[in-house]
Amino acid sequence: MKIRQISVFLENRKGRLYEVCSLLGQAGINIRALTIAETESFGVLRMVVNKPDEAISLFRKHNITANLTDVVAVEVPDRPGGLAEVLKVLSDGNVNVEYMYAFVEKFSEKALLVFRFDDPGRAHQVLSRAGITVISEKELPNL
Amino acid sequence: MEIRYWNQRLETLPRHELRQLQLERLREVVGYALQTPFYQKRLPKAGISSPEDIRSLDDLKKIPFTVKDDLRQAFPKGLLAVDMEKVVRIHSSSGTTGIPTVIYYTADDLDRWTDLLARSIVATGAGPADVFQNMMSYGLFTGGLGMHYGAERVGMAVIPVGGGNTQRQLQIMRDFRTTVLHITPSYLLHIHQRMPEFGLTPADLNLKKAWMGAEPHSENTRLKLQELFGIDIYNSYGLSEMNGPGVAFECVYKNDLHVWEDGYIIEIIDPRTGEPVEDGQEGEVVFTNLIRHALPLLRYRTRDLAFLHPEPCPCGRTARRMSRITGRTDDMLIINGVNVFPSQIEEVLMSIPEVGTNYQIHLSRHEGLDRLTVKVEIYSKLFTGDLAALEALKNKINEKLRASITINSRIELHEPGSLPAFEGKAKRVVDEREKL
């Protein structure tokens, strides 16, 4: 069960992140989780939003370089060791994590983990077998 | 100040005698030029079918200009005026911008060129007691070999080390008590910055002088390097079309470069009209080579901008002085001594699918070294969201550029539409290096 992450190319320029985020805000698109991968001269903004299709067409309309990437979102209890347990399952299952980021949810005692795997199918299998909740895109807006 | 001459008679020849000598030598090289397919087509149309058609130096103006592209078109033998049996040396450009160019020399040509280098060397006060470390590249580039033979003729102890390998350069300077260097300004500064690594200061060395050429530099750069090393630095100018180094050189007064006018006729023209500019005005430098017979070049447009000092130099030499190079008439960039055309960069960028159509070439200077930054827009449709892929793209661009222009660049990736776009002729080069 994959969800779609939006990746946005950001050049190293003052105000650029604000411009991108305010576009989403004005369009009523909510960011569920986000991270920025950076190098000295540019960055890639990665985020999970409640309306990915709208977001991507909005970016394309504004000539912002963006792309959809399949990721896997997992819900874990927000307590010490929560993340480590998931990572142990993945490690034991021999699943490689390309990158990940996490978000704490406001109204529940849960945290949202977003993973990019080189083999998402296998990751999904391993996680489900261990009884870990994988979130579908449909469930996302209600979180 | 002590003035030493290599050939006092020629160096102090009264101007009218100098002009007479130029006329005789011009007739001689026109005779050789008429042996080449290239000038056989060109000179008779201008009313010059034999050396006798040159009656005075004013007749030089009848001869059409020769340009770099003519050399390319004439490659490899269209400008060769003698039998290959007479040729003893070939220098060639690398041809990175297309067809290469070639220069041939007879033994007599080399002898005359070497003599002008000996003259240049002595004009800076160097002599047989000096130990000379030649840090210019040997090989097809004329800078290394040219100066090498001039220095041997003067009787200096020549160390033909060539460019690169800073640790070895410093070790040789220390072991042989080197007194004179032939080097580019950027490399000299680099040497200074690396010295602490090897536990050395200029006081540990025996350096007295450096001849600095191959890349334009400001007076401030000279002054700074003189202070850092506690040495005298002299400007050197040359180009392979005019044999190589030793076309113009500074004397001990370090007040711009004496053009050896018995070897080269210099003209300063308005690059747009081709007409001579007024004395002292800046323009494009045009040379006629009076001393090379194997490959004669008449009224060759260098695309270098400079001006002539009309007033004489206190050293007593009658050869007029030209300023250091103040710019170029074309868009050639000189980056740490390497000639780069923006078109070379564009060609590479446009061969990479992930790169958009807009780009910018940015030049700056850091700790005395030029830095080339190439800003490119990424092509949106090929953006995958993968950071590693973007880093790999940067490396790929740098590798491909280096294969073409031989130097490293910093690659900056930008969003599509973010670099300044131009209508008509784009200004793609931003040069923030200090002005000359």
Image: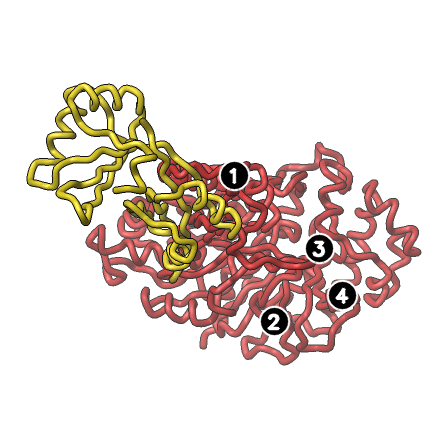
* Residue B33 coordinates in the image, percent (x, y): 80, 48
Rounded to the nearest whole Å, what is the CA distance between mark 1 and mark 2?
57 Å
Write the residue at 64% across / 72% down: B307
Which quarter of the figure has residue B285? bottom right
Q: Which residue is mark 3?
A: B289
What's the image's color scheme?
by chain
Mark nearer the N terminus (1 vs 2) = 2
Residue B201 seen: yes
Rounded to the nearest whole Å, what is the CA distance between mark 4 and mark 1?
44 Å
Which quarter of the figure has residue B184? bottom left
| Chain to which mark 4 belongs | B
Q: From the viewer's perspective, is residue B195 above or below residue B19?
A: above
| Chain to which mark 3 belongs | B
Q: Which residue is mark 2?
A: B321
Nearer to the camera, B204 or A37 = A37
| Chain to which mark 2 belongs | B
Q: The disc labelled 3 sits on which kind of residue?
A: Asn
Q: The disc labelled 1 sits on which kind of residue?
A: Lys
Dot 1: element: helix
Judge left or right: residue B23 versus residue B376: right
Chain in red, by letter, is B
Q: The disc labelled 2 sits on which kind of residue?
A: Arg
